[in-house]
Protein backbone atom coordinates (compact mmCIF):
# COMPACT_ATOMS: atom_id res chain seq x y z
CA UNK A 1 0.00 0.00 0.00
CA UNK A 2 2.86 2.43 0.84
CA UNK A 3 4.38 1.77 -2.59
CA UNK A 4 1.03 2.47 -4.20
CA UNK A 5 0.73 5.80 -2.38
CA UNK A 6 4.29 6.78 -3.32
CA UNK A 7 3.52 6.03 -6.98
CA UNK A 8 0.42 8.22 -6.70
CA UNK A 9 2.48 11.11 -5.35
CA UNK A 10 5.20 10.83 -8.02
CA UNK A 11 3.33 9.86 -11.22
CA UNK A 12 0.30 11.28 -12.98
CA UNK A 13 -2.91 9.37 -12.38
CA UNK A 14 -4.75 9.96 -15.66
CA UNK A 15 -2.80 7.27 -17.55
CA UNK A 16 -0.42 9.65 -19.34
CA UNK A 17 3.08 8.44 -20.18
CA UNK A 18 6.38 10.04 -21.13
CA UNK A 19 8.01 9.70 -24.57
CA UNK A 20 9.48 6.31 -23.57
CA UNK A 21 6.09 4.87 -22.66
CA UNK A 22 6.67 4.94 -18.89
CA UNK A 23 4.21 6.52 -16.45
CA UNK A 24 4.74 10.28 -16.60
CA UNK A 25 6.57 11.78 -13.62
CA UNK A 26 4.47 14.66 -12.37
CA UNK A 27 7.41 16.95 -11.51
CA UNK A 28 9.36 16.45 -14.75
CA UNK A 29 6.68 16.48 -17.44
CA UNK A 30 3.71 18.45 -18.65
CA UNK A 31 1.98 21.31 -16.84
CA UNK A 32 2.35 24.94 -17.89
CA UNK A 33 5.93 24.59 -19.15
CA UNK A 34 4.83 22.45 -22.10
CA UNK A 35 1.39 24.06 -22.33
CA UNK A 36 2.95 27.49 -22.94
CA UNK A 37 5.06 26.03 -25.76
CA UNK A 38 1.87 24.67 -27.31
CA UNK A 39 0.03 27.99 -26.87
CA UNK A 40 2.83 29.96 -28.57
CA UNK A 41 2.97 27.29 -31.27
CA UNK A 42 -0.76 27.72 -31.84
CA UNK A 43 -0.42 31.49 -32.09
CA UNK A 44 2.40 31.23 -34.66
CA UNK A 45 0.55 28.60 -36.71
CA UNK A 46 -2.64 30.67 -36.73
CA UNK A 47 -0.66 33.74 -37.79
CA UNK A 48 0.75 31.71 -40.69
CA UNK A 49 -2.60 30.26 -41.75
CA UNK A 50 -4.51 33.54 -41.73
CA UNK A 51 -1.56 35.23 -43.39
CA UNK A 52 -2.68 33.24 -46.42
CA UNK A 53 -6.40 32.85 -45.83
CA UNK A 54 -7.36 36.38 -44.84
CA UNK A 55 -6.63 37.85 -48.30
CA UNK A 56 -6.97 34.74 -50.43
CA UNK A 57 -9.99 36.15 -52.28
CA UNK A 58 -7.94 39.22 -53.21
CA UNK A 59 -5.07 37.02 -54.36
CA UNK A 60 -7.35 34.96 -56.58
CA UNK A 61 -8.84 38.07 -58.20
CA UNK A 62 -5.71 40.18 -58.55
CA UNK A 63 -3.07 37.51 -59.23
CA UNK A 64 -4.97 34.47 -60.54
CA UNK A 65 -7.44 36.50 -62.65
CA UNK A 66 -10.70 35.15 -61.18
CA UNK A 67 -13.86 37.20 -60.72
CA UNK A 68 -15.26 37.87 -57.25
CA UNK A 69 -17.89 35.13 -57.33
CA UNK A 70 -15.46 32.45 -58.54
CA UNK A 71 -12.81 33.53 -56.03
CA UNK A 72 -15.25 33.52 -53.11
CA UNK A 73 -16.53 30.09 -54.14
CA UNK A 74 -12.99 28.68 -54.36
CA UNK A 75 -12.07 30.08 -50.96
CA UNK A 76 -15.21 28.55 -49.45
CA UNK A 77 -14.24 25.16 -50.87
CA UNK A 78 -10.70 25.58 -49.58
CA UNK A 79 -11.90 26.55 -46.10
CA UNK A 80 -14.29 23.62 -46.00
CA UNK A 81 -11.47 21.29 -47.04
CA UNK A 82 -9.37 22.52 -44.12
CA UNK A 83 -12.00 21.32 -41.69
CA UNK A 84 -12.54 18.04 -43.55
CA UNK A 85 -8.81 17.36 -43.18
CA UNK A 86 -9.23 17.96 -39.45
CA UNK A 87 -11.34 14.79 -39.31
CA UNK A 88 -8.55 12.88 -41.06
CA UNK A 89 -5.95 14.19 -38.62
CA UNK A 90 -8.12 13.32 -35.64
CA UNK A 91 -8.70 9.79 -36.93
CA UNK A 92 -4.98 9.15 -37.45
CA UNK A 93 -4.20 10.59 -34.04
CA UNK A 94 -6.77 8.62 -32.05
CA UNK A 95 -6.20 5.35 -33.89
CA UNK A 96 -2.59 5.06 -35.04
CA UNK A 97 -0.04 7.86 -34.62
CA UNK A 98 -0.89 9.52 -31.33
CA UNK A 99 -1.29 13.26 -30.93
CA UNK A 100 2.40 14.26 -30.80
CA UNK A 101 3.39 12.45 -33.99
CA UNK A 102 0.28 13.63 -35.82
CA UNK A 103 0.93 17.26 -34.85
CA UNK A 104 4.58 17.06 -35.96
CA UNK A 105 3.81 15.43 -39.33
CA UNK A 106 0.96 17.76 -40.28
CA UNK A 107 2.86 20.85 -39.14
CA UNK A 108 5.75 19.81 -41.41
CA UNK A 109 3.26 19.53 -44.29
CA UNK A 110 1.92 22.96 -43.37
CA UNK A 111 5.40 24.51 -43.55
CA UNK A 112 6.10 22.75 -46.87
CA UNK A 113 2.90 24.14 -48.39
CA UNK A 114 3.70 27.68 -47.26
CA UNK A 115 7.24 27.51 -48.65
CA UNK A 116 5.91 26.17 -51.96
CA UNK A 117 3.33 28.99 -52.14
CA UNK A 118 5.96 31.63 -51.34
CA UNK A 119 8.39 30.34 -53.97
CA UNK A 120 5.76 29.95 -56.69
CA UNK A 121 4.27 33.39 -56.02
CA UNK A 122 7.57 35.25 -56.13
CA UNK A 123 9.09 33.34 -59.05
CA UNK A 124 6.12 32.40 -61.25
CA UNK A 125 2.79 34.05 -60.48
CA UNK A 126 3.59 37.77 -60.23
CA UNK A 127 3.93 38.46 -63.94
CA UNK A 128 4.48 41.12 -65.13
CA UNK A 129 6.58 42.58 -62.33
CA UNK A 130 4.61 44.90 -60.06
CA UNK A 131 1.25 43.25 -60.69
CA UNK A 132 -1.04 41.91 -58.00
CA UNK A 133 -2.55 45.20 -56.85
CA UNK A 134 -6.05 46.52 -57.50
CA UNK A 135 -4.91 48.82 -60.32
CA UNK A 136 -2.65 46.23 -62.00
CA UNK A 137 -3.88 42.61 -62.05
CA UNK A 138 -1.55 39.89 -63.28
CA UNK A 139 -1.71 38.27 -66.69
CA UNK A 140 -3.30 34.80 -67.17
CA UNK A 141 -1.24 31.84 -66.00
CA UNK A 142 -0.40 28.51 -67.60
CA UNK A 143 -2.00 25.28 -66.43
CA UNK A 144 1.26 24.24 -64.74
CA UNK A 145 1.43 27.44 -62.66
CA UNK A 146 -2.23 27.18 -61.71
CA UNK A 147 -1.86 23.55 -60.65
CA UNK A 148 1.26 24.43 -58.63
CA UNK A 149 -0.66 27.18 -56.84
CA UNK A 150 -3.58 24.94 -55.94
CA UNK A 151 -1.24 22.15 -54.88
CA UNK A 152 0.48 24.50 -52.44
CA UNK A 153 -2.69 25.97 -50.91
CA UNK A 154 -4.28 22.55 -50.48
CA UNK A 155 -1.07 21.26 -48.89
CA UNK A 156 -1.48 24.16 -46.47
CA UNK A 157 -5.09 23.07 -45.88
CA UNK A 158 -3.96 19.49 -45.23
CA UNK A 159 -1.25 20.54 -42.78
CA UNK A 160 -3.26 23.09 -40.82
CA UNK A 161 -6.48 21.08 -40.82
CA UNK A 162 -4.84 17.84 -39.69
CA UNK A 163 -2.90 19.63 -36.97
CA UNK A 164 -5.60 21.81 -35.41
CA UNK A 165 -7.86 19.37 -33.51
CA UNK A 166 -4.88 17.46 -32.17
CA UNK A 167 -2.91 20.39 -30.79
CA UNK A 168 -5.84 21.49 -28.62
CA UNK A 169 -6.27 18.02 -27.17
CA UNK A 170 -2.51 17.51 -26.85
CA UNK A 171 -2.29 20.73 -24.85
CA UNK A 172 -5.00 19.51 -22.48
CA UNK A 173 -3.11 16.21 -22.13
CA UNK A 174 -0.33 18.10 -20.35
CA UNK A 175 -2.51 18.44 -17.25
CA UNK A 176 -3.60 15.61 -14.97
CA UNK A 177 -7.36 15.83 -14.57
CA UNK A 178 -7.13 13.66 -11.44
CA UNK A 179 -5.08 16.32 -9.64
CA UNK A 180 -7.06 19.23 -8.19
CA UNK A 181 -4.54 21.92 -9.16
CA UNK A 182 -3.74 20.55 -12.61
CA UNK A 183 -7.41 19.83 -13.24
CA UNK A 184 -8.23 23.52 -12.78
CA UNK A 185 -5.33 24.47 -15.07
CA UNK A 186 -6.65 22.06 -17.70
CA UNK A 187 -9.96 23.93 -17.79
CA UNK A 188 -8.16 27.29 -18.01
CA UNK A 189 -5.99 26.00 -20.87
CA UNK A 190 -8.86 26.04 -23.37
CA UNK A 191 -9.54 29.73 -22.72
CA UNK A 192 -5.89 30.59 -23.30
CA UNK A 193 -5.80 28.33 -26.35
CA UNK A 194 -8.65 30.26 -27.96
CA UNK A 195 -6.93 33.50 -26.96
CA UNK A 196 -3.68 32.38 -28.64
CA UNK A 197 -5.63 31.50 -31.79
CA UNK A 198 -7.17 34.98 -31.92
CA UNK A 199 -3.96 36.85 -31.14
CA UNK A 200 -2.20 34.99 -33.94
CA UNK A 201 -4.86 36.00 -36.43
CA UNK A 202 -4.76 39.61 -35.15
CA UNK A 203 -1.26 40.14 -36.59
CA UNK A 204 -2.30 38.53 -39.88
CA UNK A 205 -5.44 40.63 -40.21
CA UNK A 206 -3.60 43.89 -39.57
CA UNK A 207 0.11 43.87 -40.48
CA UNK A 208 0.23 41.06 -43.05
CA UNK A 209 -3.17 42.04 -44.40
CA UNK A 210 -1.93 45.57 -45.02
CA UNK A 211 1.21 44.50 -46.93
CA UNK A 212 -0.70 41.97 -49.03
CA UNK A 213 -3.35 44.57 -49.85
CA UNK A 214 -0.49 46.73 -51.17
CA UNK A 215 0.66 43.91 -53.47
CA UNK A 216 3.52 42.62 -51.29
CA UNK A 217 2.36 39.04 -51.65
CA UNK A 218 5.78 37.29 -51.40
CA UNK A 219 6.58 39.23 -48.22
CA UNK A 220 3.30 38.21 -46.61
CA UNK A 221 3.63 34.56 -47.60
CA UNK A 222 7.29 34.30 -46.53
CA UNK A 223 6.38 35.85 -43.18
CA UNK A 224 3.70 33.18 -42.81
CA UNK A 225 6.16 30.43 -43.74
CA UNK A 226 8.70 31.75 -41.23
CA UNK A 227 6.07 31.89 -38.50
CA UNK A 228 4.95 28.31 -39.18
CA UNK A 229 8.56 27.08 -39.18
CA UNK A 230 9.29 28.85 -35.89
CA UNK A 231 6.16 27.26 -34.42
CA UNK A 232 7.27 23.79 -35.54
CA UNK A 233 10.75 24.24 -34.04
CA UNK A 234 9.23 25.48 -30.79
CA UNK A 235 6.88 22.51 -30.70
CA UNK A 236 9.75 20.05 -31.17
CA UNK A 237 11.83 21.62 -28.38
CA UNK A 238 9.29 20.42 -25.84
CA UNK A 239 9.62 16.77 -26.93
CA UNK A 240 11.43 15.50 -23.78
CA UNK A 241 8.82 17.08 -21.48
CA UNK A 242 5.51 16.22 -23.14
CA UNK A 243 2.96 13.85 -21.65
CA UNK A 244 1.34 11.40 -24.05
CA UNK A 245 -1.63 9.07 -24.31
CA UNK A 246 -1.01 5.97 -26.39
CA UNK A 247 -3.42 5.59 -29.35
CA UNK A 248 -6.11 2.92 -29.18
CA UNK A 249 -7.46 0.69 -31.88
CA UNK A 250 -9.60 2.39 -34.51
CA UNK A 251 -12.67 3.87 -32.79
CA UNK A 252 -14.68 3.27 -35.95
CA UNK A 253 -14.01 -0.45 -35.84
CA UNK A 254 -15.21 -0.49 -32.23
CA UNK A 255 -18.27 1.52 -33.29
CA UNK A 256 -19.11 -1.04 -35.97
CA UNK A 257 -18.54 -3.88 -33.51
CA UNK A 258 -21.02 -2.30 -31.11
CA UNK A 259 -23.67 -2.05 -33.84
CA UNK A 260 -23.18 -5.68 -34.84
CA UNK A 261 -23.19 -6.89 -31.23
CA UNK A 262 -26.27 -4.82 -30.38
CA UNK A 263 -28.13 -6.27 -33.35
CA UNK A 264 -27.21 -9.84 -32.45
CA UNK A 265 -28.11 -9.40 -28.77
CA UNK A 266 -31.25 -7.31 -29.19
CA UNK A 267 -33.48 -9.94 -27.56
CA UNK A 268 -31.20 -10.78 -24.63
CA UNK A 269 -32.43 -9.73 -21.18
CA UNK A 270 -30.31 -6.93 -19.73
CA UNK A 271 -28.52 -7.59 -16.44
CA UNK A 272 -29.76 -5.16 -13.81
CA UNK A 273 -26.38 -5.10 -12.04
CA UNK A 274 -24.44 -2.16 -13.53
CA UNK A 275 -21.04 -3.69 -12.74
CA UNK A 276 -21.78 -6.64 -15.01
CA UNK A 277 -22.38 -4.43 -18.05
CA UNK A 278 -18.71 -3.59 -18.67
CA UNK A 279 -16.19 -5.28 -20.94
CA UNK A 280 -13.60 -7.52 -19.38
CA UNK A 281 -10.52 -5.85 -17.87
CA UNK A 282 -7.79 -4.78 -20.29
CA UNK A 283 -4.20 -3.67 -19.84
CA UNK A 284 -4.57 -0.39 -21.71
CA UNK A 285 -3.17 2.48 -19.69
CA UNK A 286 -5.46 5.42 -19.07
CA UNK A 287 -8.77 3.74 -19.95
CA UNK A 288 -11.74 4.48 -17.73
CA UNK A 289 -15.18 2.98 -17.60
CA UNK A 290 -18.02 5.40 -18.23
CA UNK A 291 -20.71 4.84 -15.61
CA UNK A 292 -24.06 3.81 -17.01
CA UNK A 293 -26.77 6.43 -17.43
CA UNK A 294 -30.38 5.46 -16.85
CA UNK A 295 -31.91 8.72 -18.09
CA UNK A 296 -32.19 7.50 -21.67
CA UNK A 297 -34.06 4.42 -21.28
CA UNK A 298 -36.19 6.30 -23.59
CA UNK A 299 -18.90 48.44 -47.88
CA UNK A 300 -17.59 51.55 -46.26
CA UNK A 301 -14.78 54.13 -46.88
CA UNK A 302 -11.52 52.51 -45.79
CA UNK A 303 -9.19 55.51 -45.91
CA UNK A 304 -8.03 57.84 -43.13
CA UNK A 305 -6.44 60.67 -45.12
CA UNK A 306 -3.80 58.86 -47.20
CA UNK A 307 -3.77 55.65 -45.13
CA UNK A 308 -5.89 52.81 -46.46
CA UNK A 309 -7.32 50.36 -43.93
CA UNK A 310 -7.54 46.80 -45.31
CA UNK A 311 -11.04 45.35 -45.08
CA UNK A 312 -9.60 42.28 -43.33
CA UNK A 313 -8.55 44.48 -40.38
CA UNK A 314 -12.18 44.96 -39.30
CA UNK A 315 -12.11 41.54 -37.67
CA UNK A 316 -9.41 42.87 -35.33
CA UNK A 317 -12.17 44.37 -33.18
CA UNK A 318 -13.64 40.90 -32.74
CA UNK A 319 -10.22 39.53 -31.76
CA UNK A 320 -9.61 42.29 -29.21
CA UNK A 321 -13.07 41.65 -27.78
CA UNK A 322 -12.27 37.94 -27.43
CA UNK A 323 -9.03 38.76 -25.60
CA UNK A 324 -10.85 41.12 -23.22
CA UNK A 325 -13.67 38.72 -22.37
CA UNK A 326 -11.36 35.73 -21.87
CA UNK A 327 -9.41 37.76 -19.32
CA UNK A 328 -12.60 39.08 -17.71
CA UNK A 329 -14.18 35.63 -17.48
CA UNK A 330 -11.12 33.87 -16.05
CA UNK A 331 -10.32 36.62 -13.53
CA UNK A 332 -13.70 37.96 -12.47
CA UNK A 333 -16.80 36.18 -13.79
CA UNK A 334 -15.77 32.58 -13.13
CA UNK A 335 -14.79 33.21 -9.47
CA UNK A 336 -18.02 35.19 -9.01
CA UNK A 337 -20.19 32.38 -10.36
CA UNK A 338 -18.28 29.89 -8.19
CA UNK A 339 -19.09 31.91 -5.05
CA UNK A 340 -22.75 32.21 -6.04
CA UNK A 341 -23.12 28.46 -6.67
CA UNK A 342 -24.90 27.04 -3.64
CA UNK A 343 -25.46 23.48 -4.89
CA UNK A 344 -21.82 22.86 -5.89
CA UNK A 345 -19.56 25.30 -4.00
CA UNK A 346 -16.41 26.55 -5.75
CA UNK A 347 -17.69 25.41 -9.14
CA UNK A 348 -18.52 27.96 -11.83
CA UNK A 349 -20.79 27.64 -14.83
CA UNK A 350 -20.94 24.30 -16.59
CA UNK A 351 -19.94 23.99 -20.23
CA UNK A 352 -23.58 23.67 -21.31
CA UNK A 353 -24.57 26.79 -19.39
CA UNK A 354 -21.74 28.79 -20.95
CA UNK A 355 -22.67 27.66 -24.46
CA UNK A 356 -26.27 28.72 -23.80
CA UNK A 357 -25.11 32.16 -22.63
CA UNK A 358 -23.00 32.40 -25.78
CA UNK A 359 -26.08 31.82 -27.94
CA UNK A 360 -28.07 34.49 -26.07
CA UNK A 361 -25.26 37.02 -26.57
CA UNK A 362 -25.12 36.02 -30.26
CA UNK A 363 -28.83 36.87 -30.60
CA UNK A 364 -28.15 40.28 -29.05
CA UNK A 365 -25.21 40.78 -31.42
CA UNK A 366 -27.35 40.09 -34.49
CA UNK A 367 -30.18 42.37 -33.30
CA UNK A 368 -27.63 45.16 -32.89
CA UNK A 369 -26.30 44.56 -36.44
CA UNK A 370 -23.19 42.62 -35.56
CA UNK A 371 -21.46 44.70 -32.87
CA UNK A 372 -17.99 43.18 -32.63
CA UNK A 373 -17.81 43.48 -28.84
CA UNK A 374 -20.88 41.26 -28.46
CA UNK A 375 -19.69 38.83 -31.13
CA UNK A 376 -16.39 38.41 -29.26
CA UNK A 377 -18.22 37.80 -25.98
CA UNK A 378 -20.44 35.16 -27.58
CA UNK A 379 -17.37 33.38 -28.98
CA UNK A 380 -15.72 33.21 -25.56
CA UNK A 381 -18.76 31.59 -23.98
CA UNK A 382 -19.74 29.41 -26.94
CA UNK A 383 -16.53 28.14 -28.51
CA UNK A 384 -14.36 27.87 -25.40
CA UNK A 385 -17.19 26.09 -23.64
CA UNK A 386 -17.59 23.81 -26.65
CA UNK A 387 -13.90 22.88 -26.63
CA UNK A 388 -14.04 22.05 -22.93
CA UNK A 389 -17.28 20.13 -23.32
CA UNK A 390 -16.04 17.86 -26.11
CA UNK A 391 -12.74 17.22 -24.35
CA UNK A 392 -14.34 16.30 -21.04
CA UNK A 393 -17.28 14.30 -22.40
CA UNK A 394 -15.64 12.42 -25.28
CA UNK A 395 -14.44 8.85 -24.69
CA UNK A 396 -10.69 8.42 -24.19
CA UNK A 397 -10.07 7.16 -27.72
CA UNK A 398 -12.09 9.90 -29.44
CA UNK A 399 -10.89 13.15 -27.87
CA UNK A 400 -9.09 14.44 -30.99
CA UNK A 401 -12.06 13.46 -33.13
CA UNK A 402 -14.35 15.38 -30.79
CA UNK A 403 -12.18 18.48 -31.21
CA UNK A 404 -12.37 17.96 -34.97
CA UNK A 405 -16.16 18.00 -34.72
CA UNK A 406 -15.92 21.56 -33.37
CA UNK A 407 -14.02 22.55 -36.51
CA UNK A 408 -16.42 20.61 -38.72
CA UNK A 409 -19.36 22.51 -37.21
CA UNK A 410 -17.66 25.80 -38.16
CA UNK A 411 -17.19 24.46 -41.69
CA UNK A 412 -20.86 23.51 -41.87
CA UNK A 413 -21.76 27.01 -40.69
CA UNK A 414 -19.70 28.51 -43.52
CA UNK A 415 -21.47 26.39 -46.12
CA UNK A 416 -24.93 27.14 -44.68
CA UNK A 417 -24.05 30.84 -44.55
CA UNK A 418 -23.20 30.87 -48.26
CA UNK A 419 -26.43 29.01 -49.03
CA UNK A 420 -28.44 31.39 -46.85
CA UNK A 421 -27.07 34.47 -48.63
CA UNK A 422 -27.90 32.93 -52.00
CA UNK A 423 -31.46 32.10 -50.91
CA UNK A 424 -32.02 35.56 -49.42
CA UNK A 425 -30.81 37.31 -52.56
CA UNK A 426 -32.89 35.00 -54.75
CA UNK A 427 -36.08 35.76 -52.82
CA UNK A 428 -35.52 39.46 -52.08
CA UNK A 429 -34.29 40.56 -55.50
CA UNK A 430 -36.79 41.65 -58.16
CA UNK A 431 -36.58 43.79 -61.27
CA UNK A 432 -37.15 46.99 -59.30
CA UNK A 433 -35.65 45.98 -55.93
CA UNK A 434 -31.91 45.21 -55.62
CA UNK A 435 -32.38 42.80 -52.69
CA UNK A 436 -31.23 42.86 -49.09
CA UNK A 437 -27.48 42.54 -49.80
CA UNK A 438 -26.79 44.29 -53.12
CA UNK A 439 -23.45 45.42 -54.50
CA UNK A 440 -24.16 48.90 -53.09
CA UNK A 441 -25.19 48.20 -49.49
CA UNK A 442 -26.72 51.69 -49.16
CA UNK A 443 -29.49 50.56 -51.54
CA UNK A 444 -30.19 47.33 -49.68
CA UNK A 445 -31.68 46.24 -46.37
CA UNK A 446 -28.82 44.67 -44.47
CA UNK A 447 -30.69 45.22 -41.19
CA UNK A 448 -33.33 42.72 -42.35
CA UNK A 449 -30.64 40.14 -42.94
CA UNK A 450 -29.35 40.67 -39.38
CA UNK A 451 -32.87 40.29 -38.00
CA UNK A 452 -33.16 37.04 -39.96
CA UNK A 453 -29.89 35.84 -38.40
CA UNK A 454 -31.18 36.80 -34.96
CA UNK A 455 -34.35 34.78 -35.56
CA UNK A 456 -32.40 31.74 -36.74
CA UNK A 457 -30.08 31.99 -33.74
CA UNK A 458 -33.10 32.22 -31.43
CA UNK A 459 -34.55 29.06 -33.00
CA UNK A 460 -31.16 27.40 -32.57
CA UNK A 461 -31.18 28.44 -28.91
CA UNK A 462 -34.57 26.78 -28.34
CA UNK A 463 -33.34 23.53 -29.90
CA UNK A 464 -30.16 23.80 -27.85
CA UNK A 465 -32.14 24.17 -24.61
CA UNK A 466 -34.09 21.00 -25.36
CA UNK A 467 -30.93 19.02 -26.14
CA UNK A 468 -29.09 20.42 -23.10
CA UNK A 469 -31.99 19.51 -20.82
CA UNK A 470 -31.95 15.92 -22.06
CA UNK A 471 -28.18 15.56 -21.94
CA UNK A 472 -26.68 13.62 -19.06
CA UNK A 473 -23.04 14.27 -18.22
CA UNK A 474 -20.94 11.13 -18.40
CA UNK A 475 -19.32 9.95 -15.21
CA UNK A 476 -16.07 8.02 -15.17
CA UNK A 477 -15.15 5.37 -12.64
CA UNK A 478 -13.49 6.55 -9.44
CA UNK A 479 -10.03 7.97 -9.92
CA UNK A 480 -6.93 6.42 -8.42
CA UNK A 481 -6.72 9.13 -5.77
CA UNK A 482 -10.26 8.32 -4.63
CA UNK A 483 -9.48 4.61 -4.44
CA UNK A 484 -6.35 5.30 -2.38
CA UNK A 485 -8.36 7.46 0.01
CA UNK A 486 -11.00 4.78 0.39
CA UNK A 487 -8.39 2.11 1.17
CA UNK A 488 -6.74 4.38 3.76
CA UNK A 489 -10.11 4.93 5.44
CA UNK A 490 -10.71 1.18 5.61
Image (spheres, rainbow, N blue to C red):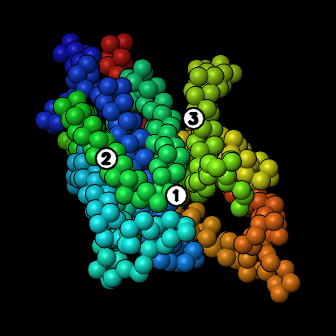
- The Cα–Cα distance between marks 1 and 2, rounded to whole angstroms, is 20 Å
Within 10 Å of disc 1 (Cα), the crowding (few <14, some 14-19, many 20+) is: many
Residue found at x 28% / y 53%: 111
SS of the residue under disc 3:
helix
Residue drawn at point x = 37 percent, y = 72 percent: 127
- Examine the rendering and report whether any part of residue 488 can be seen: yes
Mark 1–mark 3 contact, CB under 8 Å?
no
Residue 154 x %, y %: 35, 67
Split into 4 quadrants, where in the image is the C terminus? Answer: top left
Quarter occupied by residue 35:
top left
Tell me: 443 left or right of 264. Answer: right
What residue does disc 2 label? 226
In the image, residue 391 sits, relative to residue 112, either above or below, namely: above
- Left or right: 385 as drawn, with respect to 158: right
Question: Helix, strand or loop at disc 1?
Answer: helix
Q: Which residue is mark 1?
A: 213
Does residue 404 appear anywhere in the picture?
A: no
Indicate which label's residue lies in the foreground, 1 or 2: 1
Label 3: how many Cα within 10 Å (few below 14, some 14–19, many 20+):
many
Mark 2 or mark 1, which is nearer the start of the sequence?
Answer: 1
The quarter in which the N terminus is drawn is top left
Does residue 34 appear left or right of residue 274 in this picture? left
First reached walking from the N terminus: tag 1 or tag 3:
1
Amino acid sequence: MDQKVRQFEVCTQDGSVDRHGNPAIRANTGKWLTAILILVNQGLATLAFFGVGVNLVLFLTRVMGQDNAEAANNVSKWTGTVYIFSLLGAFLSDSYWGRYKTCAIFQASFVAGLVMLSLSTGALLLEPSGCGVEESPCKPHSTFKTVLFYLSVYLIALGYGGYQPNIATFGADQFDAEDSVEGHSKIAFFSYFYLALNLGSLFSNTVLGYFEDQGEWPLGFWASAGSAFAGLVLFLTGTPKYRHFTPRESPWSRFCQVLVAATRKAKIDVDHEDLNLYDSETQRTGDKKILHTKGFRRAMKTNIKNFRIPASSMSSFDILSVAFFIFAYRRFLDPLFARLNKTEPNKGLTELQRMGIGLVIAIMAMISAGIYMLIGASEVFMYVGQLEFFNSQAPTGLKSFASALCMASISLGNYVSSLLVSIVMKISTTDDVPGWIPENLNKGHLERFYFLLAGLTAADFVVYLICAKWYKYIKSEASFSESVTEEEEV
